[in-house]
Amino acid sequence: MWNEEKQHRFDELRLKEAEGVLDDAEVQELQAFFAELEAEEAEALKKGMEKLDARIDFLRAEKERIKAKNEHLEAIVVEQEKLLADAREYLTNLRGKQAALRAKYHEATGQQLVTTMRLGE
């Protein structure tokens, strides 16, 4: 695990490397530090990628759940629209029947039929 002591030694070796005065043992030590840093970085990236993959899986499942819910709601809306269309058609038929009854009443009596029932007028 990387710590302050390792960081200090790493910085010393990098400075010596920049000055061009590393001996073979120090080159190997510096390479070991780089390998350790790369391994820690790879592990951190792996954990981060695993978290991202889990989040993506969750979001995909949530998207599918919402999609299914929306499809269900859309089906309800379609059925409600059909119900409203049926109600309008039924009301139109009732109005026609009411008008026919008024006409028959007027024909039979010569008077206008007065009713308290209003059919959506």
Image: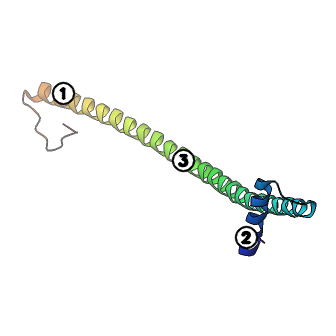
The residue labelled by disc 2 is 8
For image coordinates 81% across by 53% down, the residue present is: 20
> Which badge, 1 or 2, is on the more N-terminal residue?
2
Question: Closer to the camera, 98 or 10?
Answer: 10
Determine the residue positioned at 66% across, 52% down. Answer: 56
Give x and y (percent) for residue 44. Answer: 74, 61
Q: Nearer the viewer, mark 1 or mark 3?
A: 3
Disc with the residue nearer the chain's start (1 vs 3) = 3
Nearer the camera: disc 1 or disc 2? 2
Residue at 73%, 73% in the rendered image: 3
Amino acid on which the number 2 mark rests in the picture: His
Answer with left or right where residue 42 lies relative to residue 105: right
- For label 3, the residue is 72
What kind of element bears circle 1?
A: helix
Q: In x, y percent, where is residue 41? A: 76, 59
Do labels 2 and 3 touch, CB within 8 Å? no
Q: Quadrant of residue 43?
A: bottom right
Q: Alpha carbon of mark 1 to alpha carbon of mark 3: how far?
A: 48 Å
Residue behind mark 1? 104
Tag 3, which secondary structure? helix
- Residue 118 screen position, x and y as percent: 18, 41
CB-based contact (under 8 Å), mark 1 and mark 3 = no
Q: 113 or 84: nearer the eye? A: 84
In front here: 66 or 60?
60
The residue carrying pointer 1 sits among few (fewer than 14), some (14 to 19) or many (20 or more) residues within 10 Å by Cα, namely some
